[in-house]
């Protein structure tokens, strides 16, 4: 799939100029342009990380499920607002809301807390666009969803290198495929491997080489923060909700289902 | 109706209450405090799963101290809190699907009852005017009505189904036992007891076809006399509704609410909270970090009362404002709660 490559070149060229402007600015202040650039880097990062992942058992890679385009990110510096749009290629409602939730959580630490973030599906890309956008931007629902232990585990393990798939019953599940595991070892090294892959691409090498160390370090610091370098462990969830079993209470898994938040 | 002297009115920050380690979702002033020699008390709740009680240092001071931090009450975000009309009991609603009833014992608060039944997050809790009934609502689309019995017993009287989505807030009418709920389904529903069968049912739905909101309705508030209601929404408008109060109070459950006025263009992001003071000032708090105050306009149109902006306090907080509440006793004292983890106390006064 060449969509990622088609996007990558224009983004990189623009970025070159932008970084040069930013160098002149005050290095201590948080430059919104840095944030913007980082967000664009994330979009390249995600696109490249997921592009190569294909597993015959799980036909849909994350890239095929959800694409961040070059128009994905709009930053209004004056109002401190950021709009991110993504295009789910698969028109499956629960998928879009879960992916949107993952994006929001991962991008949360990308910019100062007073920035307001809106995440939407690209216009016309989804049958229930309005409903999905509404859910993706209902702060209360998002907070409650993140307190759902099932959803939180899924979101925290989302690092762009996993493939999502639907089983026979159309239930969403994430998996580290056997091919992935053998190719990239632990997920810790996966992120470095992927970033190195980026570096190896010619245009990226030119881009990186043309910037000073400071820009690169800032960028790398942000990236490592976002894709937090802890091993994804299926087993431990930090807090166990000790729910006394009572007959009236429905099964915790169905009460707080993965897709219906 | 009080004539409001508008000249030079400003909203001045009196104090900032810090302590919460996550966003503050809700707050409530304790009834019958802040007057007649009793220091004012306030409860707040938030994403740090705590319920905090704040008390005015003395009746002459403007400072509040944190009296107590209640940590073991809930296992998830505490979304809403409400005092019973007498101030004896405190109800807290949480994302852990329970509603806790607390009582003050000396200087401590203890949980005397836990109401269970909702299938998932409880969003709001409200006591009726006499304190004999309690209502809760949840993402499970239901509204539960509980009867308050002696010995801290709470019996579920009715489970009201009707909303097609997440119910955001419930609020009892200030004078009659009529319940209002607002929801993610963009509607406001009015629930009353059917005189004959003692069954609670939905007697009216205020939706887009009745000039209602076009997105999630987050909150409602009534004026002192109960003949008007104000609602706020994700559609960034504020709407005022009216009813024939004589009919309502005579027990006519068919007394219907009609749209009076829509206020738009004052906030540009979701309006999370609205509260009508006894004096008639409407306060709103929104995700644009601003507080707006509205009063009735002297220009009465032929269609009914009109409202106008008294003032807009931009950047009242650093982040979204989740709740605004007027003090029930001290005139023109307003509290606001925010995502920035703070509660601010404001005084509306003329600078002359």
Image: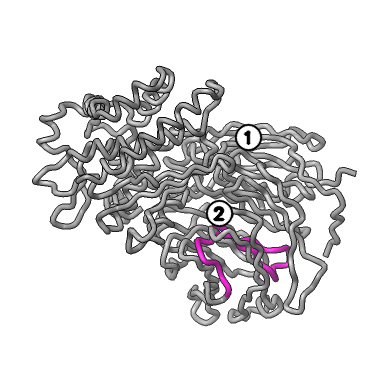
SS assignment at label 2? loop
Q: Chain of mark 1?
A: B
**What residue is drawn where x is 43% and y is 60%?**
B166
- Choose between A142 and A115: the one closer to the eye: A115
**What residue is drawn where x is 69% and y is 78%?**
B244
Q: Chain of mark 2?
A: B
Question: Residue B88: x, y in percent?
Answer: 63, 49
Instruction: Give the residue at mark 2.
Output: B270
Side (left or right) of B343 relative to A44: right
The stretch of residues the image draws in magenta is B211-233
**Colour scheme of this structure image?**
one colour
Side (left or right) of A30 relative to B255: left
Side (left or right) of B225 relative to B51: right
Question: Residue A165: x, y in percent?
Answer: 18, 49
**Please, is residue A221 above or below residue B232 in the view?**
above
Question: Residue B332: x, y in percent?
Answer: 78, 49
Give the farthest residue toward the top.
A213
């Amino acid at each position: 799939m060449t969509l990622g490559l088609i996007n990558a070149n224009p983004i990189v060229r623009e970025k070159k100029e932008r970084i040069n402007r930013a160098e002149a600015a005050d290095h201590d202040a948080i430059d919104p342009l840095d944030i913007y650039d980082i967000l664009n880097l994330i979009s390249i990062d995600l696109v490249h990380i997921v592009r190569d992942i294909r597993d015959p058992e799980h036909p849909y890679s994350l890239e095929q499920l959800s694409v961040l385009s070059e128009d994905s990110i709009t930053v209004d510096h004056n109002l401190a607002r950021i709009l991110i749009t993504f295009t789910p290629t698969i028109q499956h409602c629960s998928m879009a809301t879960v992916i949107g939730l993952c994006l929001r959580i991962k991008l949360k630490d990308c910019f100062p807390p007073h920035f307001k973030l809106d995440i939407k599906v690209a216009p016309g890309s989804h049958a229930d666009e309005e409903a999905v956008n509404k859910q993706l931007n209902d702060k209360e629902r998002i907070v409650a969803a993140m307190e759902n232990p099932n959803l939180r585990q899924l979101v925290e393990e989302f690092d762009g290198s996993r493939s999502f798939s639907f089983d026979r019953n159309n239930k969403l599940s994430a998996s580290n495929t056997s091919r992935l595991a053998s190719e990239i070892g632990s997920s810790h090294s996966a992120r470095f491997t992927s970033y190195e892959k980026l570096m190896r691409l010619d245009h990226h090498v030119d881009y990186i080489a043309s910037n000073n160390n400071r820009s690169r370090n800032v960028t790398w610091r942000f990236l490592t923060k976002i894709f937090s370098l802890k091993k994804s462990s299926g087993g431990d969830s930090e807090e166990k909700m000790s729910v006394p079993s009572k007959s009236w209470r429905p099964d915790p898994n169905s009460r707080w289902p993965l897709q219906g938040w | 109706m009080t004539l409001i002297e508008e000249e030079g009115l400003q909203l001045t920050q009196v104090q900032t209450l810090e302590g919460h380690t996550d966003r503050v979702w809700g707050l409530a002033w304790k009834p019958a405090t802040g007057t007649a020699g009793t220091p004012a008390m306030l409860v707040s709740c938030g994403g740090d799963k705590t319920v905090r009680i704040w008390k005015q240092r003395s009746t002459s001071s403007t400072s509040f101290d944190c009296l107590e931090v209640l940590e073991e009450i809930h296992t998830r975000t505490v979304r809403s809190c409400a005092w019973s009309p007498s101030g004896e009991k405190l109800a807290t609603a949480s994302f852990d699907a329970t509603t806790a009833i607390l009582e003050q014992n000396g200087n401590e608060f203890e949980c005397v009852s836990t109401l269970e039944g909702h299938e998932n997050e409880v969003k709001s809790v409200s006591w009726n005017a006499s304190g004999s009934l309690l209502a809760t609502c949840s993402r499970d689309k239901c509204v539960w009505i509980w009867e308050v019995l002696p010995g801290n017993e709470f019996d579920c009287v009715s489970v009201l189904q009707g909303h097609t989505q997440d119910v955001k807030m419930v609020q009892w009418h200030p004078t009659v036992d009529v319940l209002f709920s607002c929801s993610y389904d963009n509607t406001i529903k009015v629930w009353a007891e059917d005189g004959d069968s003692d069954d609670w049912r939905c007697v009216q739905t205020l939706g887009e076809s009745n000039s209602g909101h076009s997105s999630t309705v987050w909150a409602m508030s009534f004026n002192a006399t109960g003949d008007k209601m104000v609602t706020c929404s994700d559609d960034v408008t504020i709407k005022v509704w009216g009813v024939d109060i004589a009919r309502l109070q005579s027990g006519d459950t068919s007394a219907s609410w009609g749209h009076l006025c829509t206020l738009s263009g004052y906030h540009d992001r979701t309006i999370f909270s609205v509260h009508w003071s006894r004096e008639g000032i409407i306060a709103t708090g929104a995700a644009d970090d601003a507080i707006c105050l509205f009063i009735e306009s002297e220009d009465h149109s032929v269609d009914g009362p009109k409202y106008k902006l008294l003032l807009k306090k931009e950047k009242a907080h650093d982040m979204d404002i989740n709740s605004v509440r007027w003090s029930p006793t001290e005139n023109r004292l307003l509290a606001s709660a925010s995502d920035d983890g703070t509660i601010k106390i404001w005084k509306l006064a003329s600078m002359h």
